[in-house]
Image (cartoon, helix red, strand yellow):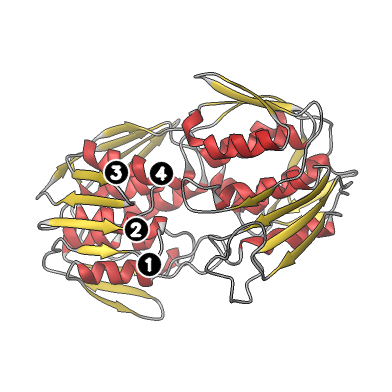
């Protein structure tokens, strides 16, 4: 089977308008939540990304009806005859493990294949499994997946070893219909978590936010379907703002509220970017060039790990030495060799640079980088290893001298809404063809 390839000719500064839809990291979790509702649920402003199709296919296999039309997804729950997600979905994304809690409520047992997603570091299932066991489920991990059973999930107190987004979602989805109260300590607080909690509340769940990363859920016997509109994707919004800055242009991003980009905006401002911000859009430009920076990724409200891939390309065009310290995923810098092959001057280290020691400080994980700019990048033949690295490769190709060929573009199409059309609208000379 031939694979799609993108050919990119640098075409000068990228300028224009981009409208982002709901977050890839939110839409699939809302689709899972809809399993729990008695009656149909509708999600609007949904992105047209591969992740939606994968999650929809899993739900249909479980007996749900999934209807999609131009940014609107309606899920009609049905009886779950076989509470098993097929092994064919092994490794495609991280969604199957989030289905364990809902399936235990609906059918008393479940099997899901092992998690996948991008190869950016370990995504341990231990947090999820330990949480479900705390609710009273019997959980067995086999080579091919995870088996679970429970007559009834019972509220519990869970302290997460790390504020993991996925584990927090697993606990929320299990807790809303569990018997009694659940308290999650050290919970993730990313905007997508808050958005999921608000959606569950709209469905009838009883959820409270408490100080110090605590979420309290009082279980209810049933919840109904609900309708919601997703807020704009903060990762995509930041990525397109950087697309303008890195090429010496300016991009105006519509559809993502400012409060989702607070830390990102200030980081770019310190580097010399100028912003115009309204209730409808955010625009960034850097007419006087860019300064270097030292940035550490962290859990929310820190600088998001998914923002650092476009930032790394921006560092190559900032005048001086920049430092990046990745603290969320130990293998997130796996895309650096592709940028180095295009002429980027980046050195990676296993020590903690640009911030205090993190949980990888005594490991061999290459999780810090020093970047020298301004560097002339050159076109290359690059294979994208994951969603976010894919976007960084497009940015590098857009600012390089000479044409580039990008492979593995299915990754970027899994996570970004119509990226070919969006980049072309900004003036990028991009041709998609079968490889």
Q: Residue at x 45, y 67 (%)?
A: 90
Query: Image quadrant for the C terminus?
Result: bottom right
Name the residue that disc number 4 marks: 192
Q: Nearer the viewer, mark 2 or mark 4?
A: 2
Quadrant for residue 11, please give it.
top right
Residue 63 in picture, x, y percent from top left: 26, 53
Q: 142 or 194: nearer the eye? A: 194
What's the distance in space between the residues labelled 3 and 1, CA to CA? Answer: 21 Å
What's the distance in space between the residues labelled 1 and 4, CA to CA? Answer: 20 Å
Q: Answer yes or no: is residue 164 visible.
A: yes
What's the distance in space between the residues labelled 2 and 3, CA to CA? Answer: 16 Å
What's the distance in space between the residues labelled 1 and 2, CA to CA? Answer: 7 Å
Residue 416 in picture, x, y percent from top left: 57, 42
Name the residue that disc number 1 marks: 161
- Residue 186 is marked as 2
Marks 1 and 2, the one that precedes in the sequence: 1
């Amino acid at each position: 089977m031939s694979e799609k390839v993108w050919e990119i000719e640098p075409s000068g500064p990228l300028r224009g308008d981009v409208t982002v839809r709901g977050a890839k990291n939110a839409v699939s979790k809302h689709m899972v939540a809809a399993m729990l509702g008695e009656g149909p649920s509708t999600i609007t402003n949904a992105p047209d990304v591969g992740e939606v199709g994968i999650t929809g296919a899993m739900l249909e296999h479980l007996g749900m009806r999934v209807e999609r039309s131009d940014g609107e997804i309606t899920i009609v729950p049905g009886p779950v005859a076989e509470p098993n997600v097929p092994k064919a979905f092994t490794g495609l994304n991280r969604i199957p493990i989030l289905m364990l809690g809902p399936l235990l409520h609906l059918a008393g047992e479940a099997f899901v294949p092992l998690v996948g997603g991008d190869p950016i570091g370990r995504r341990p299932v231990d947090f999820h499994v330990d949480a479900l066991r705390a609710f009273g489920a019997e959980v067995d991990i086999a080579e091919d997946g995870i088996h679970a059973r429970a007559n009834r999930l019972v509220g519990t107190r869970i302290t997460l070893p790390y504020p993991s987004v996925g584990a927090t979602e697993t606990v929320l989805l299990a807790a809303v219909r569990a018997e009694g109260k659940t308290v999650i300590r050290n919970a993730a607080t990313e905007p997508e978590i808050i958005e999921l909690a608000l959606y569950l509340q709209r469905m009838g769940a009883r959820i409270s936010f408490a100080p110090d990363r605590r979420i309290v859920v009082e279980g209810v016997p049933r919840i109904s379907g609900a309708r919601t509109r997703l807020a704009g994707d903060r990762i995509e919004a930041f990525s397109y703002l950087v697309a303008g800055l890195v090429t010496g242009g300016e991009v105006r991003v519509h559809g993502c509220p400012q409060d989702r980009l607070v830390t990102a905006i200030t980081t770019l401002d310190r580097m010399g970017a100028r912003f115009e911000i309204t209730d409808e859009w955010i625009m960034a430009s850097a007419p006087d060039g860019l300064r270097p920076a030292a940035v550490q990724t962290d859990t929310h409200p820190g600088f998001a790990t998914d923002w650092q891939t476009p930032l790394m390309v921006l560092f190559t065009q900032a005048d001086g030495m920049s430092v990046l310290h990745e603290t969320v995923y130990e293998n997130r810098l796996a895309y650096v060799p592709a940028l180095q092959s295009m002429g980027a001057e980046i050195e990676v280290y296993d020590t903690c640079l640009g911030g205090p020691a993190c949980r990888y400080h005594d490991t061999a994980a290459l999780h810090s980088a020093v970047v020298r700019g301004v560097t002339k990048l050159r076109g290359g033949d690059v294979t994208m290893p994951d969603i976010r690295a894919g976007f960084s490769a497009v940015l590098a190709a857009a600012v390089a001298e000479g044409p580039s060929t990008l492979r593995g573009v299915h990754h970027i199409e899994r996570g970004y809404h119509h990226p070919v059309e969006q980049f072309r609208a900004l003036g990028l000379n991009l041709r998609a063809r079968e490889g």
